[in-house]
Amino acid sequence: MSDESNGSQEEPQVLEELKLPHLFSNEKVRELHATIENEWDSLQRSACQTAAGRALWKHVTNDPVADLLAGETYLRSLYEKMTNDRINKAREVSGVILAVRTLWFDSKIQDALNSFSGGGVQVVLLGAGMDARAYRLSCLKECDVFEVDFTEVLQVKTTLLQEAIESAEGDQPLRMTAKSLNRVAADISKDDWLEKLKISGFESERKTVWVLEGILYYLSHANALQVLKIIADKSSITKTVLLADFMNQPCISSNSNFHFYCDWPDHLLPSLGFSSVKLSQLGDPDAHFGLMHDPLNLFNKLRSLPRSVQTNPDDGTPCRRLYLVQASGSPNQNIP
Ligand SMILES: C[S@@+](CC[C@H](N)C(=O)[O-])C[C@H]1O[C@@H](n2cnc3c(N)ncnc32)[C@H](O)[C@@H]1O
């Protein structure tokens, strides 16, 4: 499974023509996208692939800047795959995983915020990439949002969004929906990213939602566990919710950017200190959003097999699963 890979149907059979934003003709925007093409590594470019998924599934994700943040190359590449999927009447149309994953995180962020009484909640997006939640989720209006990613990614993103704000026409100017937004440049595999967060205003004692979307599997095993442990430890200080997606072992191959996998995140997270864990698979009732009805699509086939099965007995294909996991903890749970 790749982050920019396949998904489901229930969509019009003919894809609308690809429309590119007017801002693509802006010189500064062109330069920024050229920088992405010429200077970013594949890890950083994964941010644009993900944004392309949200852009081409905009009718469900409602992301107003995903196309601008993705850039033409990634939009065209995914558009071509989606067109071929439609022509071939594929049961899973490319990008649907990203659409469902986006909607799942959106809904769980909202649920988590509803579950916290009072305001003052922090939302930390680790490996935020081209995520534009701080501009599109109204539930963040009382939240301080922190986006952590590589310096290069955050700089280009900030400038692209600034161009969008300055050039806004008509009655829908781009506005931040979060109470505040801090971009924190850090390599979470090396730096003391927690210290950098704190320097940027993050407070360990305040209720926090941690959003790890499309990031854990890019880390080494040791590093991913370290990040999860740091977050779990925070739950002994304050109410904490973790939202994360996990790949299972069959998703990982030696020649990809993916390293960390976990077949049983629902066992791992309690062992690190989280009290309550709920795991969903793509296609589950809280993870299909009306986009995965076909009982024979890949995700529904996988759901019908026990999670311990790693090779599909019908066709010998690897059972590549993406788990969507919410976990929480609070200081009270730690009192014996
Ligand atoms: C697949 S993208 C997902 C981005 C975003 N969470 C989303 O869903 O749109 C992965 C992101 O993680 C970032 N990333 C990967 N490894 C990182 C690291 N060690 N430190 C900081 N960011 C990292 C990449 O730069 C990229 O923006």
Image (spheres, rainbow, N blue to C red):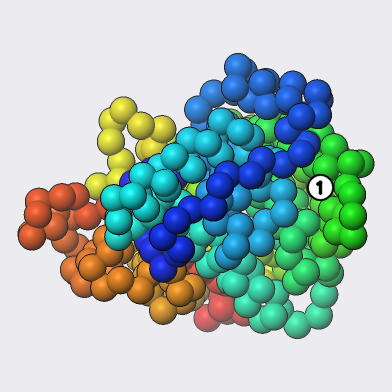
Q: Position of residue 34 (x, y in %)?
A: 66, 21
Q: Amino acid at mark 1?
A: Asn
Asked whether the viewer can see residue 96, the reply is yes
What is the total number of numbered labels drawn onto the structure image? 1
Q: Position of residue 331 (x, y in %)?
A: 63, 73
- The residue at the point 30 percent across, 55 percent down is 90
**Rendering quarter of residue 36:** top right
* Of residues 265 and 73, the one drawn nearer to the viewer in this rendering: 73
Label 1 element class: strand
Q: Which residue is mark 1?
A: 182
Classify 181 as above or below 268: above
Picture coordinates of residue 200, whole percent (x, y): 82, 45
In percent of the image, x 45 and y 74: which residue is there? 290
Q: Is residue 297 left or right of residue 244?
A: left
Vertical side of 161 occupied by 331: above or below: below
**Relative to 116, does residue 207 appear above or below in the rendering?**
above
Q: Is residue 135 left or right of residue 71?
A: right
